[in-house]
Amino acid sequence: MSANVGLFLLVGCAFCFFAKSIGWAAADELGEPRATALGLTIAPTTLTAPQPDNSAALRDPGGGLSLFLRNGCGACHTIRGTNAHGTIGPDLSHLGSRTAIGAGVLPNTEEAIARFIARPDLLKPGVRMPAFDMLPQTDIQAIARYLKALQ
Amino acid sequence: MIRLKHVVLGAVGLPIVILLGAWVGFFNVGASSGHWKVTAWFLQLAMRSAVRTYALAVDAPKTLDSRGLPAAAGHFARGCAICHGEPGEPRSPAVMRMLPQPPDLALTVGDWTDAQLFRIVKHGIRFTGMPAWPARDRDDEVWAMVAFLRELPKLDANGFRDLALGGSQPTAPAALADCTRCHGGHGGGRGDLVPALAGQKEAYLFASLQAYARGDRTSGFMALPVTGVDPADLAALARHFAAQPSVSADSDQVPAEVIGRGQQIAEDGIPERNVPACSGCHIGSDKNPLYPRLDGQHAAYLERQLKLFRSESRGGTRFWHIMATAAQRLTDDDIRAVSAFFSKRSAGPQ
């Protein structure tokens, strides 16, 4: 019986604890919030005027085109003469002949194209293209080489 | 006469005496003798009041969605029945000696409103052993469990086993039998909210299982089956399901114009709202093996996943964020249409 008196007192004390804590929830604090917030806002793009057919786009010695299509870049970008018909991002049919890329923030080199594909958000805040840095670096380089060759 | 001195002495002294008592081990924390009647009454009062108060903030749906019943029942069989018992299965005597004793829910669910059950299942009850839901941001799963608890009193032993274990083959290896409980013997997914795994890409299945195990993708239903499973076994399970022939999941009638709208989104996207064409990543055998096939998948499951992506509460493999970008600008109507389209699309020659 004395044990029960003790338990009752203990419970009374414990109650002071509850008053401080927030409710009876056992685990509101499970896990940690998903770290990456997507800072991507999407706004309309300007469509490029139709260009003459370029079948040179199908030449793919380094496998860059098939990597481009395999990873879904074609969902947002067009490369004329290929299966890429996306209209969310700029038309890349003649990327190699531009003077600058990333809306003018980067020089048009193979290395800069690769850097843009991996982390466009670092180079252009508010960019509407997701980062692809989870691809193997060699794949990104092969894609960049292919795009740079599109004259 | 009580003097101020005594009051102060008492105020300082009593806690010290209690602390001392606790330290010497004077209080009986053993559960064998049960609570004093008044203690038990007090604890119940505090628990019930807390649940009642906190449930006021819960926004309960008017009708509970019954599509998640098989998954919830499957989860109940493994995650809850050990304490609460299941129809036709006596509980272990060890559990009957827990303090407080987990109630037979078939008898007590009637005491609670849907919102109160939601509150209890989502957050658990402190100091009683009643655990919280194992995944954050998955209120949809908690509601599925509440819907199941409402069914529980109506189920006899056979009814429960059918609902919870329907497709499983008791002869299969233990790890696989655990999966078929919800995903079915032919990997078709039992109930519209459990995905079909049959014929899905192996790399995607394996990466998804690892994502659940790491907590990168949250689901209370999937957390338990992957916990503590060896990665080599997860790989074997992924291989098993990927090799099964795909099954056509849904037979509901959907108006042709809804499917047509879905096809348009799938093939062209919605350029004016910057929604990319789904086909660029999800159609064709030349696509990245971590981009899942959607053909023949349950429409309700696809809808649920798209809504989770849209609210950024669906993680996944290391590619998940590109899908979150794609889903950002979809309306509920778009989601319904495109999900219906893919669920009706047969894999075709891949």
Image (tube, coloured by chain):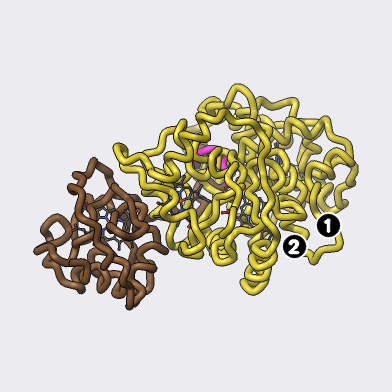
Chain colours: A brown, B yellow
Nearer to me, A5 or A112: A112
Chain letter for mark 2, please.
B
Please, which residue is most extreme toward the top here? B62
Q: Position of residue B178 (x, y in %)?
A: 75, 58
Q: Earlier in the sequence, mark 1 or mark 2?
A: 1
Residue visible at 72% across and 50% down?
A: B182
The answer to whether residue A118 is seen in the rendering is: no
Chain letter for mark 1, please.
B
For the residue carrying disc 2, how many other residues have a C-alpha within 10 Å: few (<14), some (14-19), or many (20+)? Answer: many
Which residues make up the magenta segment? A22-26
Residues at marks 1 and 2, CA–CA distance in whole angstroms? 9 Å
- The count of marks equals 2
Residue visible at 42% across and 64% down?
A: A70
Q: Which residue is mark 1?
A: B169
Work out which quarter of the rendered image holds the N terminus of chain B and state it.
top right
Work out which quarter of the rendered image holds the C terminus of chain B and state it.
bottom right
Q: Which residue is mark 2?
A: B176
Q: Are marks 1 and 2 on the same chain?
A: yes
Dot 1 and dot 2 residues touching (CB under 8 Å): no
- When the figure is inspected, residue B315 is found, relative to residue B286, above or below; the finding is above
- When the figure is inspected, residue B311 is found, relative to residue B222, above or below; the finding is above
Dot 1 lies on which element?
A: loop
Q: Position of residue B279 (x, y in %)?
A: 44, 51
Residue visible at 64% across and 39% down?
A: B121
Q: Position of residue B295 (x, y in %)?
A: 57, 49
For the residue carrying disc 1, how many other residues have a C-alpha within 10 Å: few (<14), some (14-19), or many (20+)? Answer: some
User: Which amino acid does the dot numbered 1 rest on?
Assistant: Gln
